Amino acid sequence: LSSPRTTMPESLETIIQINDNDIICGRKGVALKQPGNLAYRKIVGLNKELYATCRKNEKLRVSKSIVAAMRDVGGRFLERVDGKTSLSLVGQDEDGSLIVWRDIG
């Protein structure tokens, strides 16, 4: 018997409008300058010492509280539906295709 797999369901809603509190998944492109990403990195930085010094069973609680804080101000954790890295948040990509996002939970 294999153990049941737990995964977070991805949103079926497609998103074409980004707000300032959204966190864009990625390491480059618009993710570096997006206001939501800057706020997220600041909160992570403020909690770094707490996370590093807390017990293993408390680490998940710290992580979840950071995500909840971002969601409380309307932030969504977004990735492009097509998996590409974005140079733009809205509109069309370099090849003319519409840039579409999904909330990954």
Image: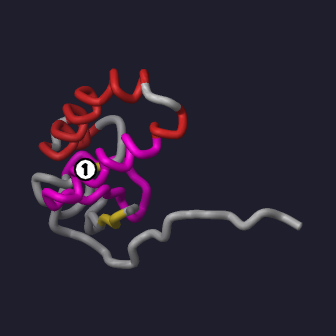
User: Closest to the observer: 55 or 31?
Assistant: 55
Q: Position of residue 52 (x, y in %)?
A: 42, 23
Q: Residue at x 30, y 59 (%)?
A: 95
Residue 53 to residue 70: above or below: above
Q: Residue at x 22, y 51 (%)?
A: 70
Classify residue 72 by image quadrant. Answer: bottom left
Number of disc labels: 1
Q: Position of residue 78 (x, y in %)?
A: 31, 57
Q: Is residue 19 left or right of residue 93?
A: left
User: Closest to the observer: 9 or 48?
Assistant: 48
Residue furthest bottom in the image: 12
Residue 62 to residue 18: above or below: above
Question: Label 1 is placed on what type of residue?
Answer: Ile
User: Closest to the observer: 78 or 29?
Assistant: 78
Q: Quadrant of the N terminus?
A: bottom right
Q: Residue at x 19, y 32 (%)?
A: 42
Q: Which residue is mark 1?
A: 23
The stretch drawn in magenta includes residue 68: yes
Classify residue 71 by image quadrant. Answer: bottom left
Residue 43 to residue 23: above or below: above
Q: Position of residue 16 (x, y in %)?
A: 21, 69
Q: Is residue 10 left or right of residue 22?
A: right
Magenta range is 60-88
Colour treatment of the image: secondary structure
Residue 26 to residue 5: above or below: above
Q: Position of residue 7 (x, y in %)?
A: 57, 63
